[in-house]
Image (cartoon, rainbow, N blue to C red):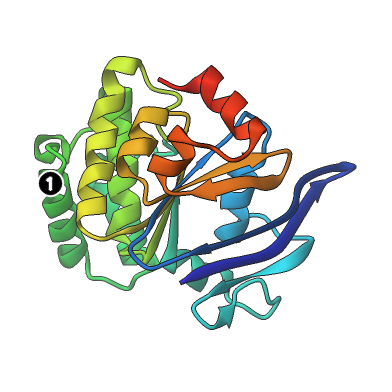
Amino acid sequence: MLRADAVRKSFGANEVLKGISLEIAAGEVVCLIGASGSGKSTFLRCLNLLEQVDDGDIWLDDREITDPRADADAVRREIGIVFQAYNLFPHLSVEQNIMLGPVKAGGQTRDAARGLAHELLGRIGLAEKAGAYPDALSGGQQQRVALVRAIAMQPRILLLDEITSALDPMLVGEVLDVIRDLRRDGMTIVMATHEMSFAQEVADRIVFMADGLVEESGPPEQLFTAPRSPRTAEFLARHRT
């Protein structure tokens, strides 16, 4: 469904991605792990075309989305992304935050978008917060709303960039429960995370990145119990939870 071929990205003299190649199948959950600075966030931003690659290409089905002629906005409607910063509009209510994309970019009527917003909020246990504003919500609630806002656009693929790292540990579980539900619904997910136990639970495949490259990739039961790379083993020994 989504394929990156030898993707490179530099910021000035700093080469962050040094030739990443990765394939993601429809319905697959792939967790990217690795130390800060290994390139996980930059890679996700390249997949969503928020960053322009310097070399290599990215394909969605049979379309090269890194082709300069590709419609980036159309691609982003198919590949949603959620960041660790919730990025909710503070002057809009929860309902309005969720409705904005489907109405402005998806062409839905306000009534249809409002109905969808309430349905999704009900699924994550926040139906009563539809009229609230972001600053009245906890961090976990804001992040769940950010997830729903992305889901409301009905993307084919969802990219999640360390979405629990800014949360109090007591709130992390609220957000991870939503991701479990998305996985059960068959959503294709690529997720950068430091939550090792959660990655081991939900991922079909773990990709360990180091220094802008894929160091090792495999199913959780193999990578966590018998990593082939010494660098993977060293990382897991330091970060296993």
Query: Depth check: 19 or 97 in front?
Result: 19
Which residue position holds label 1? 123
Residue drawn at x 74%, y 67% as measured from the top left: 56
Residue drawn at x 32%, y 73% as measured from the top left: 107
* Residue 5, x across and y down, in percent: 67, 67
Quadrant of the image for the N terminus? bottom left
Q: Can residue 88 be seen in this view?
A: yes
Query: Depth check: 209 or 152 in front?
Result: 209
Residue drawn at x 13%, y 51% as measured from the top left: 118
Q: Is residue 223 above or below residue 104?
A: above
Which quarter of the figure has residue 164?
A: top left
Query: Depth check: 172 or 202 in front?
Result: 202
Q: In this view, does 67 lie above or below 167?
A: below
* Residue 197, x across and y down, in percent: 36, 29
Query: Depth check: 77 or 31 in front?
Result: 31
* Residue 209, x across and y down, in percent: 62, 41
Question: What amino acid is labelled 1 in the image?
Answer: Arg
Q: Can residue 162 be seen in this view?
A: no
- 88 relative to 230 in the view: left or right: left
Residue drawn at x 49%, y 49% as measured from the top left: 218
* Residue 82, x across and y down, in percent: 43, 45
Quadrant of the image for the C terminus? top left
Q: In this view, does 115 lie above or below 121?
A: below
- 69 relative to 199 in the view: left or right: right
User: Dot 1 surroundings within 10 Å: few (below 14), some, or many (20 or more)?
Assistant: few
Mark 1 element type: helix
